Image (cartoon, coloured by chain):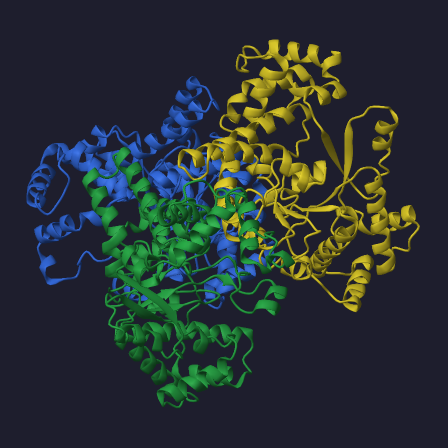
Chain colours: A blue, B yellow, C green
C-alpha cells in the first residue's frame, strides 16, 4: 500500500490523485479496505462496476456530484445509516463545544464523547507537562499535587459524563498496570512532572494511571477501554514530516497476564466495573485474553481491532476466544473508523463473519439454530448496548 | 462464566443452584463445557431437550433419580464407559491406600497412580520444607542431604511403580530445565531447604529437578509428562478465600527451545526415554514443539490441553503440529477431567476432530483413505497405549 | 521422523536403507515431505502405487534404473522442469568456479549465485577471523581495518554480480539491526576480530552488518533477504558428530518491530531498495510482518519458510498476511530445496494453496474471478521475477 505515488507533482489535482488510486486499486485485493470501498461504491453511490483506470473519471464525477446533494450531508447519512449512537474520542482538555452545539441545534442524534486522557496521563505525550497545567486551569485544581491532579481528572470525567459520555479509552504502548502506595506514587508523579523520569519510570506512571482510572470508573461508572500494544511513530522520517499518529504504528508482542495483574488484584472481582480489552497481538486471544475474561467479572473482550478488523481477523477472534470466554464476555462489534461512509460496510462485514461462525457451529451441532439467531442479535446489538451502557 | 450468581443466599438449596445454572446455560454457548454437558445429558441421562429454565426441574429430578441407581455407581460407569485404564494424580507423600483398597476389593479395573512430585520439588509449593521432611520419614532417607533426597525420590517412584504407575507428571510455571554440576546443585538444594533461595534460585531448582526426573525416568522407565506455562493463583482474593488450584490459573507465554535445551542436551537422544510435552501457548505448536518433537527421539507431544481441549483447539493442534512432527510423535488423546461423567463426551469430541482433520487430508489427496482409518485408530488407541506404556 | 534406524549395521547397504525407509513411510503421513515424494514418484518415475514394504524393491529398481538414463541427468531435468532460473547460495569466499564452468560449457541455463556472507559477518561462524583474512587476500583489501573490510565486501558483491547474482541472503539468529556511528563500529569491529567480543557484542556486530549490507544493496541493487530466528545446533551430540547445519535447528520467538527499527529508520523509505523478510515464527505474520511490509516501501514478505513450506503453513501465511499487506507486498513462491527432484512438487503445492485461497476469496465475493486469475499468475511468476530482479 506504499507506492501510490503520493508526493508526485501530478497529485496537485484531486482528479489525478483519484486516477492514480484507481490505477492502483488492484493493490488492495484481499484487504478489508477493498471490501469497504466496494460496498460503499455500490450501496451508497450505486457504482457496481469494479473501479479501474477505465471508469475512474465516471466514478469521480458520480461521487463528486452525490457528495453535493442533501442526502449526503452528515446528518442525512447518520439517519440513513440508522445509527443510534456515535462516539467521538476526546482529550480531557477538549471543550466539548461541538457536542454542545449539536445538542443546542435541536438535532436529536446521540453523539457522545469518549474520555481519552492520554495527553495528560502519558509523560511521553507531546506537551505532557503543559497539558497537566492546562487541566489544572480548566478544573481550578492544583495539578502540581498528586491529589489535585486526581481531583482534576475526576472533574474532567464528570464534565464528560454530563455531555453523555459513557466510556473512557486508553491507548498505551503496553498493558502494564501498577498499584503503588501513596508515597511512592507521589514521588513518581513529581518525577514525571519535572521531566526527570526515565523511560522505565514514565512507563510505571502510565501503569499506575490505568489503575487510578479503574478506581474512578468504579466510582463514576464510566466503562474503561484499553487499547495497548502499538509502537507509535516507528518511521522517524514520516514522524518528522507529518507528526504523531500518521500511520507508522506497528503492533508488537503484548503481555496481559502479568501486566494486568496489579489492576485485577485490586478491582478484578468488581461486578460494577467494566474493563474492555483490545489487542493487536492475536497470539494472546486463546492464551491470555479469553482465560482472563472468562475468569474476572470486570473484564470483557473488545472486537478484533485495527489490522484485525477484517474477515479473517474477525473469524480468528471468534475461533480463538469463544471456547474459553463464550460469546457473553465479548462486547459485540464497534468500529473505530475515521471514514464516516465506511460505517455500514464495516458493520456488514462484522455481521457476516459472526453469522458465518455461528452457522458453522449450527452445522456441526455445537449450538442450535434458534440459539444462533439469538447470539447473532446479541453480538450485533444487545451486547454493545449493555457493555457500553448505551 | 463469571456471573452465575454463586455466593448469593438463594444458592443454599442445590435445586436453586441448578435453576440458576439452567437459566444461565446460554452463557456456555460455543464452549466445550456446553458440548460435554449436552452429550452427557443425552447419552447418559436420556435428556434430549436442551437444558433451560423451563425444564430445569425435570432435569434435576431425572439426574437425581438416576444417580441413585446401581448403574450410575462409579464401577458400573467405569465398565459401561469401557475404560481400560484410569490414572489418578498423586503426591509422592500419598499412601496410595485407595489404590491398594481397590486392588484388594477384587475389582479387576486398572486404576493406577501418576507420580506428581510438585509438592516436594517445587520450593514455592505450600509446605515444601515440611513435605521434604515427610518424604524423608516415609522413605527412611535423610532428605536434608541432596543424595538422600534423590534416593528418597527414587524410593517413592519405585513404590508408585509397584502400584502400577507408568508415568510422572510435572506442573511447573515454565519449561525451564537445568543441568548443574554436583557442587552447584548441593549448594542450591541447601538454599531452597533453608528457605533463603530467592525467586530466581527457586526457579533454577525446579529446572534442575526436571532434569533429575528425566535421569530417573531413564532408569526406571516411567514416562515423563511436563505441563508448563500456567500462572497459578492470579486472583489474590480467590486464593485467600479458597486456596490453591481454585480456577484463577492463567496461561502465559512459554519458551521451550532454550528452556528445554539443558535437559535435551543430556537426554534428548535417548530412545529409552519418553518425555511428553504439553502447552497452553498455542504459538509454540508450529514454532517450537513440532520441530523439537520431530527432532529429538525422546520427545512426544501431548494432546491439546486444558483451555485448548476443545474442537477448535484440537483442530489447531493437528493443523499446526502434523506437518512437522507427523502423527506418530503425538500420543493420541487423553483427557484430564475431574468430572467422571464427562469422559465419554471428551473422547467423542477428540475422535470427531481427529477424524475431521483426517477426512480433509483424504479429500485433498494428502493421505489415502485406508491410511486415515489406520491413523484414526492409532490416535484413539494404539499411540496412547504405547506412549504411556499401558 | 527420528527413529528410522539410521546408524544400525543393516544400513551399510543402500537397498536396505531404502527398505527401512519404505517400512517407515507411514511416519510421514500428513507431512509435506510425504506429498513431495508421492508427487515425484508418480510424476517423475511413474510409480503410482503408494510406497510400502511390499513394493520397496520395485521402487528401488525403477528409480535406480531411471537415474541412469539421459533424461534424468541434471541438465535434462532442468529443462524438463522448465526452470528459468536456479540460484545457488555461496560464501563470499567461494571462487564461483562452478558457475563459470557452466557458463563456459555453452549451456544456456541461467544458474546464478546468491551472496551469503554469514561466514565473514557472523563472529560465531566457525573460522570467522580466518575467513575475514581470506576475504582480504581475495580482494586485495586490508580487512583488518573497518573501511578495508567494507571495501572487500563491496568487491566480493561486485564479483558475484558479474556472475549474474541479483540477491544476498542473511541467516542470522535474530532480526536485530543496528546503526552505530563510525567510531563505535570501528571499536566493535576490532573487538570481534580480536575474538574478545562477548555474546552481546557479537550479536551487535551481526546487527550492524545487516544495516551495512542494506547500504551496499542500495548502491549495487542486490536484493536483500533476511532469514532470522533459528537456534542452530540445538543438539550438541549431533553437532559434535556431524557438525554445523545437520538438522538440529529449532525456531524460536522472533521480534521484528524493534529489531528492524534501526535499519528501517535509515533505509525503510527507499524505493530503490528491496528487503525480503522471512520468518519461522508465524505469530509475527499478522502482528509484525504484514504491518511492517504494508508500511515500508523497501519491505517485501518472502513465502512461508522451512517448517511452514507446507499446505497448512502456506495457507496460514496468506490468511494472516494478505488483509494487511495485500498480495503485492509478497514475492510469490520460491523454494529453497536441496533436493533437485522435489522442485516441481514444491511449486505444485504452492500454486494449489494460493489458488485455494484465491478461490475462497472469489466464492465469498471478496475479489472477482478475473482478478484471482491475475493474482495467481503474479504469485507464480511476475512477482518473483520483479522482486528478485530476474
Observer-nearest residue: C279 or B49? C279
| B381 displayed left or right of B126 | left
Question: Is residue B298 depicted above or below B86 in this figure?
Answer: below
Residue C297 x, y percent position in the rendering: 27, 61
Question: Is residue C280 depicted above or below B221 in this figure?
Answer: below
| C159 displayed left or right of B8 | left
Question: Is residue C333 depicted above or below A218 in this figure?
Answer: below
Give residue A56's quadrant in the image: top left
The residue under the point 83% across, 37% down is B163
Residue A174 x, y percent position in the rendering: 47, 53
Observer-nearest residue: C207 or A128? C207
Residue B332 x, y percent position in the rendering: 60, 37
- Is residue A301 visible in the rendered structure shown here? yes
Which corner quadrant holds the N terminus of chain B?
A: top right
Observer-nearest residue: B342 or C243? C243
In this rendering, the count of numbered labels is 0
Which corner quadrant holds the C terminus of chain B?
A: top right
| C328 displayed left or right of B314 | left
- Is residue B1 visible in the rendered structure shown here? no
The residue under the point 85% across, 29% down is B103
Residue C282 x, y percent position in the rendering: 44, 51
Question: Is residue C24 depicted above or below B1 in this figure?
Answer: below
Amino acid at each position: 500500500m506504499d507506492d501510490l505515488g503520493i508526493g508526485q507533482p501530478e497529485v496537485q489535482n484531486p482528479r489525478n490523485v483519484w486516477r492514480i488510486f484507481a490505477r492502483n486499486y488492484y493493490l488492495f485485493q484481499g484487504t478489508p479496505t477493498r471490501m469497504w470501498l466496494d460496498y460503499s461504491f455500490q450501496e451508497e453511490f450505486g457504482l457496481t462496476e469494479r473501479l479501474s483506470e477505465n471508469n475512474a473519471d465516471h466514478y469521480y464525477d458520480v461521487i463528486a456530484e452525490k457528495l453535493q446533494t442533501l442526502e449526503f450531508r452528515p446528518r442525512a447519512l447518520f439517519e440513513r445509516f440508522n445509527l443510534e449512537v456515535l462516539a467521538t474520542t476526546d482529550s480531557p482538555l477538549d471543550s466539548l463545544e461541538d457536542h454542545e452545539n449539536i445538542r443546542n441545534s435541536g438535532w436529536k442524534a446521540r453523539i457522545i464523547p469518549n474520555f481519552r486522557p492520554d495527553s495528560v496521563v502519558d509523560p511521553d505525550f507531546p506537551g505532557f507537562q503543559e497539558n497537566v497545567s492546562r487541566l489544572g486551569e480548566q478544573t481550578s485544581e492544583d495539578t502540581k499535587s498528586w491529589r489535585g491532579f486526581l481531583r482534576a481528572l475526576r472533574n474532567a470525567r464528570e464534565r464528560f459524563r454530563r455531555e453523555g459520555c459513557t466510556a473512557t479509552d486508553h491507548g498505551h504502548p503496553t498493558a502494564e498496570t501498577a498499584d503503588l502506595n501513596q508515597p511512592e506514587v507521589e514521588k513518581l508523579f513529581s518525577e514525571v512532572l519535572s521531566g526527570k523520569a526515565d523511560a522505565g519510570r514514565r512507563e510505571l506512571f502510565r501503569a499506575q494511571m490505568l489503575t487510578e482510572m479503574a478506581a474512578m470508573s468504579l466510582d463514576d461508572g464510566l466503562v474503561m477501554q484499553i487499547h495497548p500494544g502499538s509502537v507509535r511513530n516507528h518511521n522517524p522520517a514520516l514522524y518528522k514530516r507529518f507528526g504523531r499518529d500518521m500511520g507508522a504504528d506497528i503492533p508488537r508482542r503484548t503481555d496481559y497476564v502479568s501486566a494486568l495483574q496489579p489492576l485485577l488484584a485490586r478491582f478484578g472481582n468488581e461486578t460494577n466495573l467494566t474493563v474492555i480489552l483490545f489487542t493487536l497481538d492475536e497470539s494472546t486471544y486463546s492464551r491470555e485474553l479469553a482465560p482472563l475474561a472468562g475468569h474476572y467479572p470486570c473484564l470483557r473482550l473488545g472486537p478484533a481491532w485495527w489490522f484485525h478488523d477484517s474477515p479473517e481477523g474477525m473469524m480468528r477472534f471468534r475461533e480463538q476466544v469463544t471456547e474459553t470466554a463464550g460469546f457473553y464476555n465479548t462486547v459485540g462489534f464497534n468500529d473505530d473508523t475515521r471514514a464516516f461512509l465506511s460505517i455500514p460496510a464495516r458493520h456488514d462485514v462484522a455481521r457476516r463473519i459472526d453469522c458465518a461462525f455461528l452457522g458453522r457451529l449450527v452445522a456441526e451441532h455445537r449450538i442450535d439454530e434458534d440459539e444462533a439467531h439469538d447470539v447473532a442479535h446479541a453480538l450485533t446489538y444487545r451486547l454493545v448496548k449493555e457493555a457500553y451502557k448505551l
